[in-house]
Amino acid sequence: MRIRISHTISYEYAEPARHIAQILRLTPRDHDGQHVMSWRIEPSIDGRLRASQDAHGNIVHTFYADGPISALGIKVDGLIETVDLAGVIRGGLERVPCDVYRRDTLLTAQDDALRAFTDEATAGAGTPLSQMHALMAAVHERMTCLDASGHTGVGAPAAFAAGEAIAQDIAHVFMACARHLGQPARYVSGYVARSDDLPLGSGAHAWAEVYLDGYGWIGFDSANGLCPIDTHVRVAVGLDFADAAPVRGSRQGGGGENLNVLVTAQEAGSRQVNQ
Amino acid sequence: MVAFDEMTGSGQELRPAYDALDRWLKEAPAETLALRRSQAELFFRRIGITFAVYGDEESTERLIPFDIIPRVLTKPEWTKLEAGLRQRVTALNMFLADVYGPKECLKAGIIPPDLVYRNACYQLEMVDFKVPHGVYCHIAGIDVVRVDADTFYVLEDNARTPSGVSYMMENREVMLRLFPELFAMHRVAPVDNYPDQLLATLRSVAPRSAPSDPTICLLTPGQYNSAFYEHSFLADKLGVELVEGSDLLVKDDVVYMRTTQGPKRVDVIYRRIDDDFIDPLVFRGDSVLGVPGIIGAYKAGNVTLANAVGTGVADDKAVYSYMPEIVKFFTGEEPILKNVPTFRCREPEANAYVLDNLEKLVVKEVNGSGGYGMLVGPHANKAQIETFRRKLKASPEGFIAQPTLALSTCPTFVASGVAPRHVDLRPYVLSGANGISCVPGGLTRVALKEGSLVVNSSQGGGTKDTWVLDA
């Protein structure tokens, strides 16, 4: 599928900020399941944008700007070609050993409730792959996905206890469960295009990937209850949301902040025929 | 358990290094000693050398008790100890360069990869990054304890931001003022060149692009940190600026310090802020102590951080248990200093043994420090032991256990007079592009409670001056 993405992040500051520094993980890489045809990041104000790579191999842009800054917009426009590989990631850049992703983090902490839930959900599954599918189905069934606007992340244990959460925390819940079973699991931030196959709408999204011997990394989108298909665009991976966040920023001065995010991810032109 | 005594050995003899000291202690009138002790306390109070105790609501700032009887090491004892420290720190730096680089020690099976990869102190940002001049641990504080005349054990490697060196220097200062006659009787190796050595170390690791006279600053978390006194003390002795995160600014991957003459480029930062708090853009986003963008500047090669980011993976208590193999693998030599035998509770058999023998063992949190979160079995009550039993069952991988060592004792002033109290020693080892250096001695900490083995100042420990006799 050819997907056109437009993502605008706008900040307005109560008082002009003196200095802004941001780290942007807003640029996807190529792998067998996706090919970036064009991609552009454009800040609305003058500053220095420098590209580098983080530990996970994500493309990172560091943005520095000097004030006075009363408003800042980051605009992302891109066109990407995707192929449905049933969530299997091949041909990607892997910089750290997959065992790193067995590490627990603050957002993916396990508690007794999560462990009991995992053990019950995967009791009948024979192989690690079928365990993960059973787990995805159980998390999908258990968790109601909340709209990202108006809600913030709380981490896996609190999200699980509440039974409802935004997509990033549903990914955290799945990751905590997968790590309890000893599987390396990582967080994926990205986009999904509108599709009849997906119960949730289009836009920015988050899911998880698990490393399984013999397969490599496989995506599991518990919020939608399926493995990523050609509607999914992978942008960045990490140990959790904080590690793969699209924007991490800091500023001096500026007082209060008003944030607006607008994302569209739509199929562009006709569906490509792939083998 | 009769411990080796630094002055009297097994209790019968008088060890040669303590000859003159013993005579002096016996001859000096009790009133004089009492007077000098109160003068010492007054001195520490006046210079304001305090430390903060966490979890103590009464007073956040306290004086650390100082004992006027020095702990004495002979030149041969120190020579051997120093060789062991140099070997240990060389291995620590090589280990760090390896786990963040080629990972040969993991491939060779020296240490389970899991202990590195799943360790929260293994900073992914550092993987494949070449630190300036290949040095990771510029300042190490290696805690050693003695069990007999010839045997020293390393209790802990402190490779992150070890503190206490200001006490080493102040203790000597106080002793020189109060007891000049003792220094006339002994040839004590000086420690006052530590700031010069530290400055030389920091200058030696400046980025290659830095000017020949690099700008250095000391980054502190601020006055609420338990070691703030030391930060200001060291900045003063080094003749460098003491800065907080908000005094530094990163622009286009270059770190600047705000000064009255405008921004000044910084080349080397002696940072006393933990990894987690140093850059809110990379580590904890809620940190207000750090400097946004400092990791970007570091990775661009524009500034040196001392110690490097990610050194915590080397002094983790689970990794500690593999240090003898790590020393052998990287230096090709037998370890000079011993390691305390360590039960890794992550191994089910070891944990079963630990659970059966809690009353005999010392149990430590893998990531704990400062004597917090620790069980000393022989001195614990039933409730404390049961609390640890529950913790060990819930998350065994978070703990290690060690037999209680008979730490050596040293004569110490107590309410009833002079009595033996257990001591340890923290020497400070500096590593730079100019090699390794170590001032003779270090900080001797003493457990002031009778029989106590916990020397941490946060747990009621005191300090002593440490002498290395030149002849």
Image (cartoon, coloured by chain):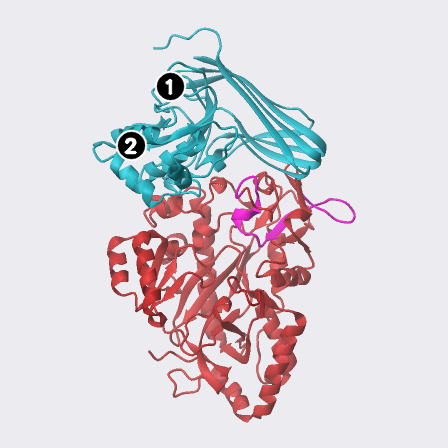
Chain colours: A cyan, B red
Closest to the observer, B373 or B347: B373
Identify the residue at horizontal 60%, vertical 69% (top origin): B169
Q: Dot 1, how many residues are within 10 Å of its Cα: few (below 14), some (14-19), or many (20+)?
A: many
Q: For marks 1 and 2, give the one nearer the viewer.
A: 1
Quarter residue B42 falls in: bottom right
Q: Which mark is residue B217?
A: none
Q: Dot 2, how many residues are within 10 Å of its Cα: few (below 14), some (14-19), or many (20+)?
A: few
Mark closer to the chain start, 1 or 2:
2
- CA gap, disc 1 and disc 2: 21 Å
Quarter residue A6 falls in: top right
| SS label for mark 1 | loop
Is residue A53 within the magenta segment?
A: no
Q: Is residue B97 above or below residue A97?
A: below
- How far across and how far down the image is residue A89, in percent? 37, 25
Q: Chain of mark 2?
A: A
Amino acid on which disc 1 is placed: Ile
**In the rendered image, is residue A97 in sight?**
no
Q: Which residues are magenta?
A: B256-284
Numbered circles on residues, count: 2
Residue labelled with disc 2: A213
Residue labelled with disc 1: A229
Identify the residue at horizontal 26%, vertical 34% (top origin): A121
- How far across and how far down the image is residue B409, in percent? 43, 78
- How far across and how far down the image is residue A61, in percent? 57, 30
